[in-house]
Amino acid sequence: MITLNHYLILSGCLFAIGMYGIITRRNALLMLLSVELLLNAANLSFVAYARYRGDLAGQAFVFFTMVVAACEVAIGLAVAILLYRTRETLNTDEINSLKW
Amino acid sequence: MNEAILFYLFSGLTVLAALYVVLTKNPTYAVLSLVAAMFCLALLFVLLRAYFIAAVHILVYAGAILVLFLFVVMLLGVGREENSNRRQMEYRVSGGLVIAGFLTGIGLMVKAVSGNREGAPVLTGTIEEVGKLLFNRYWLPFEITSILLLVGIIGAVVLSRKEQGQAGGQ
């Protein structure tokens, strides 16, 4: 019998894996990819709540979250392309001219 | 019983694909395994009776966003991640600590809040039902997201345009 807790734990695991990806990856594009994983973990938890509490508002919210994720990916990739154009590298260890 | 088997199978596949996304050194394989994770997540959405969301998930994420990622990865010629300096080991240790702390927190929270509301009706997330919500009660966020999409398009075009005098012609 699959309860809400199963889906919440799965969503938490995916979120943790996404966080590990953001901390560990040094390439800007792969960091953005891990952010997509975070967003999808949150989407899964929204849909799980929508099913187990009898309210479809969770699914409507997933719709809006997807739109926001699409915009963020478009602009994030444009910024990554600009970064590559000016710095010739995508390695975030080397992009530190704002550090003290 | 069938639902349990399907849930464990697809959730295991999703976690495996997500682990491959964050652990592999080849960026193309990372994007493709995220596509696989999106498909497995869409299957989990179908298990949760969210049919419209599952279809939109595949269309938008696997069909548009990750294709855009793949284009950028291929056009920028992103190479494999090189390996093992001391800082990378520090990143991995801190990442492991963050994961451990986060999973502990999630586990404790889920255990504390485990009172399932069994009397709630199980609604089916067809496109008609979700559409009724989107166009009646959540109409204003719907319109605002369309403006957000317009802003995103303009922003992406403006940001990735070459400066005047760098391009060839004119």
Image: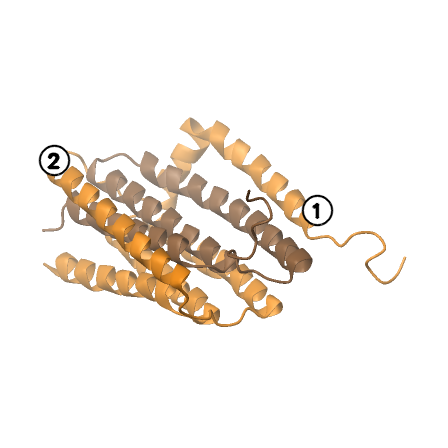
Chain colours: A brown, B orange
Image quarter for residue B168? bottom right
Q: What quarter of the picture does the N terminus of chain B occupy? A: bottom left
* Residue A61 % position (x, y): 38, 37
Label 2 neighbourhood size at 10 Å, few (<14), some (14-19), many (20+)? few
Which subunit holds the residue at mark 2?
B
SS label for mark 2: helix
A27 relative position to A81: left or right: left
Q: Is residue B80 visible?
A: yes
Marks 2/1: CA distance?
49 Å
Q: What quarter of the picture does the C terminus of chain B occupy? A: bottom right
**Residue depicted at 61% across the width and 50% down the height:** A79
Q: Is residue A93 above or below residue B81?
A: above
Q: Callout 2, which amino acid?
A: Ala
Label 1 neighbourhood size at 10 Å, few (<14), some (14-19), many (20+)? few
B170 relative position to B98: left or right: right
* Residue A26 % position (x, y): 47, 59
Q: Callout 1, which amino acid?
A: Val
Which subunit holds the residue at mark 1?
B
* Residue B169 % position (x, y): 88, 61
Nearest the camera: A84 or B18? A84
**Residue depicted at 26% across the width and 65% down the height:** B13
* Residue A46 % position (x, y): 31, 41
What residue did someone put label 2 on? B112
What residue did someone put label 1 on? B158
Q: Is residue A11 visible?
A: no
